[in-house]
Amino acid sequence: MDAPTTTSADGGWFRGPAPAPPAGQVNPPDPEPEPDPEPDPLGASRDALLIRRTLAEIAPVADKVTSYFYALLFIAHPEVRSLFPAAMDSQRDRLLKALLTAADHLDDSDRLAAYLQNLGRGHRKYGTRPEQYPAVGEALIGALTRYAERTWCAETQAAWVRAYTKMSQVMIDAAAESERRAPPWWFAEVVSHDLRTPEIAVVTLRPDQPYPFLAGQYTTLETPWWPRIWRHYSFASAPRADGLLSFHIKAVPAGWVSGALVHRARPGDILRLGPPGGSMTVDHTTVNGMLCLGGGTGIAPIKALVEDVAEHGEKRPVEVFYGARSDHDLYDLDTMRRLQQAHSWLKVRTVVDSGTQLPDVVREYGPWNSYDAFLSGPPGMIRSSLDALKNVGVPFERIRHDGVEELVATGD
């Protein structure tokens, strides 16, 4: 039997049962509406303002929202449970957080479209089908209805239904377009495993068929030891003639995938690769200098960018700042120094954290206002570097990085 249709105030709809009221309540009255949001100086739409108001209310109870969201999803649609890992503590808030992140960028159409298209392509590897998106929408509205009681009203629900309808369609369209030209995943054999430190390994893979990507991008990896758990890792080299792919993996505390890749993977093991993603790539139509900040294993895509510039025969100045917590953690310094010796346009500086942060050191050099900046590393480093670079005159549109929200909840 078809599920009933829930219709928003503006005629937007998704299929599925209307969200039930919390236990113990029968036909609860609509809450008193909040005062209209203050006008946004940046010209955000009414829907965006209503959505951000909801996000602000649920932020303090995010864990409860997440638990309720998955409970609604799996109880109403048990068939989708098989798309998720057996141990949901590894999944945590990934799906819901991705949706909320997208909603928060509703008025940044270009950024939102790129983010959602990447999500849609990436969800092919889970086996997600277009007809399953409404189930997620039902659970999303149901969780928000319960935990955004102070701000929730018919107008707010209509805004969320419109937003989710648009977002899910972008993801569905991107997945369909991707299906015409690429598989949902690739199998890849481990051909070498180089343990650089007790916690960092350089892992090289041979995919079972050609894998197209650009220097500076990333992919997702799944190991045979933790099925359906995928983690993001940046390519550590530009595309190679032999088709091999290298990654720098750091085992993090409680990191199931990273721990397996560093301590358990061996040549001959078979992994799965998702499609490439990310936009931290070189614009070869310009000759702008490049300012590259790589923290920890964030040096991996920076190395790939340097190789990309070299392979294109460019002579643009490239300044690399390689940050680590100790000399011991500069695990790829010899490689970067060899690249510096081979290319007169490349300068590599190391920053060992002894109370001095990487962005602080970058301020001492420059000027950087004519450079394109590339940031890769922990989210905290990216945020502080963004602030530092804008403060020294680097235009925002010339700062490129794997967005903190793009790699949302990447975990290990």
Image (tube, rainbow, N blue to C red):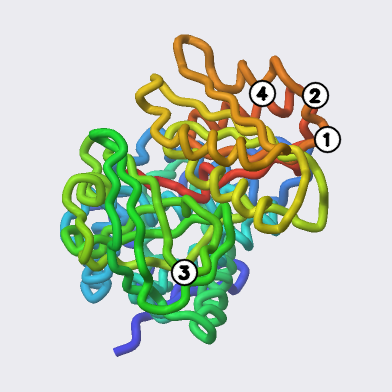
Left or right: where does residue 33 sit relative to residue 93? right
Q: Position of residue 238 (x, y in %)?
A: 55, 57
Q: Residues within 10 Å of mark 2 (few under 14, many from 20)?
A: few
Inspect the image, locate mark 4, and give the three-letter code of the amino acid beneath it.
Answer: Ala
Q: In the visual, does 227 lie left or right of 17? A: left
**CB contact under 8 Å: marks 1 and 2:** yes
Find the distance from the CA under tag 1 to the CA under tag 2. 8 Å
Residue appearing at x 37%, y 27% in the figure = 329
Quarter containing the C terminus: top left
Label 1: element kind: loop
Q: Which of the labelled discs sits on residue 388, or is there none?
A: 4
Compute the Cα span from label 1 to label 3.
Answer: 36 Å
Which mark, residue 367? 2
Give the residue pinned by disc 1: 370
* Residue under pointer 3: 242
Q: Are discs 3 and 4 less than 8 Å apart at CB?
A: no
Give the mark nearer the N terminus: 1 vs 3: 3
> Residue 164, percent across and down?
52, 64
N-terminal-most mark, 4 or 2: 2
Question: Label 1, label 4: how many angstroms apart (C-alpha)?
Answer: 15 Å
Compared with 354, 405 (above or below) is: below
